[in-house]
Image (cartoon, rainbow, N blue to C red):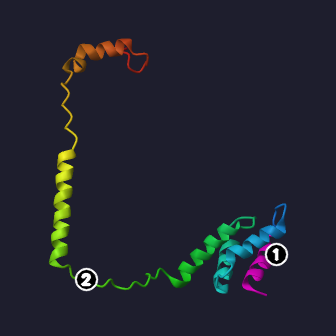
Amino acid sequence: MTSIEIAIARLTAVFGEPKTTDPETYVEEFRKALAGVEGRLVEKAVDRWMKRETPYWPRPGELRAEVEHAASEIYGNRPAEHKPIEARSVSPEQKARIAALVREAVESISTTAPPLPQAKKPQWERGQRHAFEDMQRTSPNRLHRAK
C-alpha cells in the first residue's frame, strides 16, 4: 500500500465514506493532490487533520495545505540556494551612455511636467460663527441642530 492509500484508509476509518455524490472521484482528487509527496509528509498531514475537532473529511486542498505545514515543521524554513551574481565591470562607454539616458529622461520630465495648480482663495466666510449656526438651523440631520 502506498502512503496515499494508507492516508485514504485512515480517513475512511475515522470519518467514514466521504459525504459526496461521487466518492470515487473525490478519492481520486486526493490522489492527484498528494501525488509525488513524500510518504512521511502525507502521514504527518493526516495526523494533523485527525487532531482537529472536525467530523469531516478534509478537502484535497486542505490536506495539501497540511502537507506544506508538515514540510515546514520537518525541514524548517531553509533558505533557497542561490548562486551569487558575477560582478561585471562597466566600461567608460557604457557609463557615458547611461549618463546620457539619465540626462535625457530628466530633461523630458522637466519639460512635460504639468503646471502646478493655483491655490484656491480661502472662503473665510464659511468658517465664521453665523455660517455654522445657519448650517445647524437648516441641516436635515438632527445631530447638527442646536438644541
Instruction: Decide if residue 133 is in sight here.
Output: yes
Report crowding for label 1: few under 14, some 14 to 19, many 20 or more residues within 10 A (C-alpha). Answer: few
Dot in front, 1 or 2: 2
Q: Is residue 66 on the magenta stretch?
A: no
In-image side of 139 versus 73 (left or right): left
In-image side of 22 versus 52 (left or right): right
**Closer to the camera, 52 or 26?**
26
Cα distance between the residues tagged 1 and 2: 62 Å
Q: Secondary structure at mark 2?
A: loop
Instruction: Decide if residue 16 is in sight here.
Output: no
Above or below — where is 132 with respect to 71?
above
Q: Quadrant of the N terminus?
A: bottom right
**Closer to the camera, 116 or 11?**
116
Q: Secondary structure at mark 1?
A: helix
In-image side of 53 versus 134 (left or right): right
Mark 2 = which residue?
A: 88
Mark 1 = which residue?
A: 13
Q: Quadrant of the C terminus?
A: top left
Q: Residue at x 66, y 82 (%)?
A: 36
Q: Please report contact status of discs 1 and 2: CB closer than 8 Å, yes or no.
A: no
Residues shaded magenta: 1-15
Q: Residue 2 occupies which quadrant of the picture? A: bottom right
**Coordinates of residue 28 in the picture (x, y in percent):** 77, 72
Above or below — where is 54 with respect to 43?
above
Q: Residue 63 occupies which quadrant of the picture? A: bottom right
Q: Residue at x 44, y 82 (%)?
A: 80
Report crowding for label 2: few under 14, some 14 to 19, many 20 or more residues within 10 A (C-alpha). Answer: few
The amino acid sitting under disc 1 is Ala
**Coordinates of residue 70 in the picture (x, y in percent):** 59, 78
Q: Which mark is residue 82?
A: none
Of the numbered discs 1 and 2, the one sitting upstream in the chain is 1
Q: Residue furthest bottom?
A: 1
